[in-house]
Structure formats: C-alpha cells, structure tokens
Amino acid sequence: QVQLVESGGGLVQAGGSLRLSCAASGSIFSINAMGWYRQAPGKQRELVADISSGGTTKYADSAKGRFTISRDHAKNTVYLQMNSLLPEDTAVYYCNADISRFNLRPVPYWGQGTQVTVSS
C-alpha cells in the first residue's frame, strides 16, 4: 500500500505563513509529479501548485509570488511554503502524487487533507 500523510495546516492571521508537508510511504517504485490542491467550502477542488520529478513547477495564478512548492526526493516528501496568506486561501489542502508501484504505470494517490484557515 501507499500512504500520503500531510501536516502543517492550522489557523493563521492574514499576512502570515504556513508550511505544508506531505510524505509518501509504502511500496513505492518511483514518484512522478507531486502537487497540492485545495478545496474551499462549496467550491471544486483546484490545483494550487505541482512539481515534476525533474523539478519543473507550475502554480495557479492565485499562488504565484506567494507560494513555493519544493520536494525532497530522498524523503519522498513535497512541501508547500505559503506566505502572505489571505482569507480566501482558507480551504482543505490535499497532497497528490503520481506513484508507480513495482515498476507499473503510475497512478494518482491523495492525502487525507489538512485544514488551512486564514483569519482576517
């Protein structure tokens, strides 16, 4: 089995910062892209940022200039540094990773989600 375990969410005032972490564990052969999505109440889940195995990053317009995604290959971990947080960043943040097991085709896995609440 494969697990993605997120941490780092919480309550922060507008303008503050949080750092999310997501560690993948289990019978992993390789990990391709890793990313962060979020879902606010009443809204669809949306991509925040992702990073390829080669380090290429992509950000939602709302995250550009404020959030930074990075990964540690040795630890199978992806991070999301969030600065200058706004109340509209309030959401459940989900980690996603395309993981190959036993050298099979990669499939997407999801974490359980971590709540981020930004107060005004």
Image: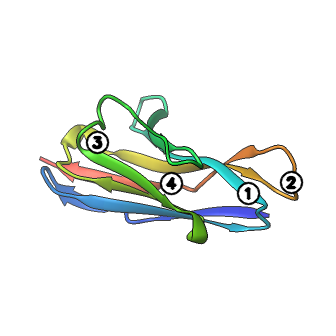
Q: Is residue 120 left or right of residue 117?
A: left
Nearer the N terminus, badge 3 or badge 1?
1
Q: CA distance from mark 2 to mark 1?
A: 8 Å
Q: Is residue 37 visible?
A: no
114 and 20: which is toward the camera: 20
Q: CA distance from mark 2 to mark 3?
A: 37 Å
Residue 97, image x, y percentages: 62, 49
Q: CA distance from mark 3 to mark 1?
A: 31 Å
Residue 96, image x, y percentages: 58, 48
Q: Quadrant of residue 12?
A: bottom left
In the rendered view, how is the structure colored? rainbow
Nearer the N terminus, badge 3 or badge 4?
3
Q: How would you rate the neighbour count of disc 2 (Cα within 10 Å): few for under 14, some for 14-19, many for 20 or more?
A: few
Residue positioned 58% across, 55% down in the render: 111
Q: How would you rate the neighbour count of disc 1 (Cα within 10 Å): few for under 14, some for 14-19, many for 20 or more?
A: some
Q: Which mark is residue 89?
A: 3
Q: CA distance from mark 3 to mark 4?
A: 14 Å
Residue positioned 42% across, 29% down in the render: 43
Query: Which residue position holds label 1?
Result: 30
Q: Secondary structure at mark 4?
A: loop
Nearer the N terminus, badge 2 or badge 1?
1
Mark 3 near mark 4, Cβ–Cβ under 8 Å? no
Query: Which residue position holds label 2?
Result: 103
Q: Secondary structure at mark 3?
A: helix
Identity of the amino acid at label 2? Answer: Asn
9 and 23: which is toward the camera: 23
Identity of the amino acid at label 1? Answer: Ser
Residue 1, image x, y percentages: 80, 64
Q: Secondary structure at mark 1?
A: strand
Query: Which residue position holds label 4?
Result: 113
Identity of the amino acid at label 4? Answer: Gly
